[in-house]
Image (cartoon, coloured by chain):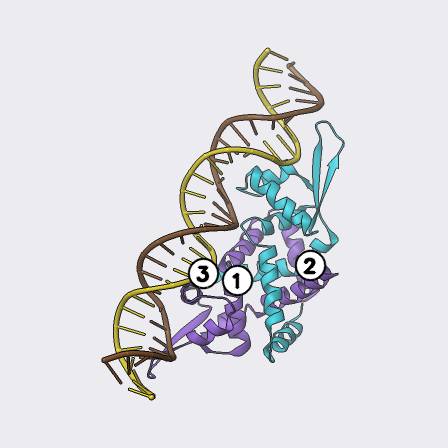
Chain colours: A purple, B cyan, C yellow, D brown
Amino acid sequence: MDKDKAQEIIERNCEGDHTQGILAARDVMELLSGKWKIQIIATLSFDGKKRFMDLLRNVEGIGSKMLSKELQTLESNQLVTRTVCDTKPITVEYEITEYGKTLNALIAEMISWGIEHRKRIMS
Amino acid sequence: MDKDKAQEIIERNCEGDHTQGILAARDVMELLSGKWKIQIIATLSFDGKKRFMDLLRNVEGIGSKMLSKELQTLESNQLVTRTVCDTKPITVEYEITEYGKTLNALIAEMISWGIEHRKRIMS
DNA sequence: GCTATCAGTTTACTGAAGGAAAGTAGTTTC
DNA sequence: GAAACTACTTTCCTTCAGTAAACTGATAGC
């Protein structure tokens, strides 16, 4: 999203009733709420498909209970897909969906703002 | 942020170690965590400065304890300013800072994604 | 004196988030 | 037959986010 478009969205929300916009932003926060969802989505976005154990190792600090729960809600929101592979022992692959990829711009915005924020905090 | 820049950020994170990016995104989620911060920031961004009671009325559903607590953390993060006015009875004005305004692009991105998401959920 | 407004604080409670560790179930390797 | 790997699930526990309602203390109007 370019700066003019961002400004346009903000301005559209400034005239009169901006309940819808705020509700929409709130939905997004809820969808991505908690300590892990962004990390899981980002990992799958950056590295491509991964198995359960790979995620357990790559998403630093998460436990199996949390990972399993978070993956379920991400799947129910159609942000990732789950594929059982007929290997021995069975493995399960998780991959980000096309829809999940539409979050890239938002995540990129978070990363760039977050990095600037870190710089500000440090100094 | 335009699409190319978003893509560039994502790609930069894809090569090798992307811990910093994920940590930065996590920071942002933490900074904006909870049910109210985005709503408060958005209200102050859209409508300009507001007093405590105005916010209590405008941020739908919030109670005075939460509002007071959230405003304190937003102030400590330099996203809003608090100004006591020498009126009778005293009033306090909250206003978004220049720094807080740099969140506009992120909030706009959330709103636009959220609105598309709502459309998808409805149909 | 009674009520109301302003900007909160205090107390007491509930429910959800999250962590640690053990258990389940199938398969393969030693 | 024991251990190890796969992908979880279950149980138990603690901490924190959030809510409701009462209270504070100053001022102002009726």
Give the amino acid type for the residue marked by disc 2 in the picture.
Gln
Question: How many numbered marks are there?
Answer: 3
**CB of mark 1 within 8 Å of CB of mark 2?**
no
User: In the rendered image of this protein, does residue A26 appear above or below residue B62?
Assistant: below
Q: Which mark is residue B121?
A: 3
Label 1: which residue? Answer: B116
Quadrant, the C terminus of chain B: bottom left
Real-space Cα separation, disc 3 to disc 1, in angstroms: 9 Å
Real-space Cα separation, disc 1 to disc 2, in angstroms: 18 Å
Image coordinates for residue A77, horizontal then vertical, percent: 44, 64
- The residue drawn where x is 47% and y is 63% is B120
> Crowding at label 2, few (<14), some or many (≥20) Cα neighbours within 10 Å?
some
Tell me the subunit letter for badge 3.
B
- The residue drawn where x is 60% and y is 64% is B25
Name which of mark 3 and mark 1 comes first in the sequence.
1
Real-space Cα separation, disc 3 to disc 2, in angstroms: 26 Å
Quadrant of the image occupied by residue A88: bottom left
**Can residue A18 be spotted in the picture?**
no
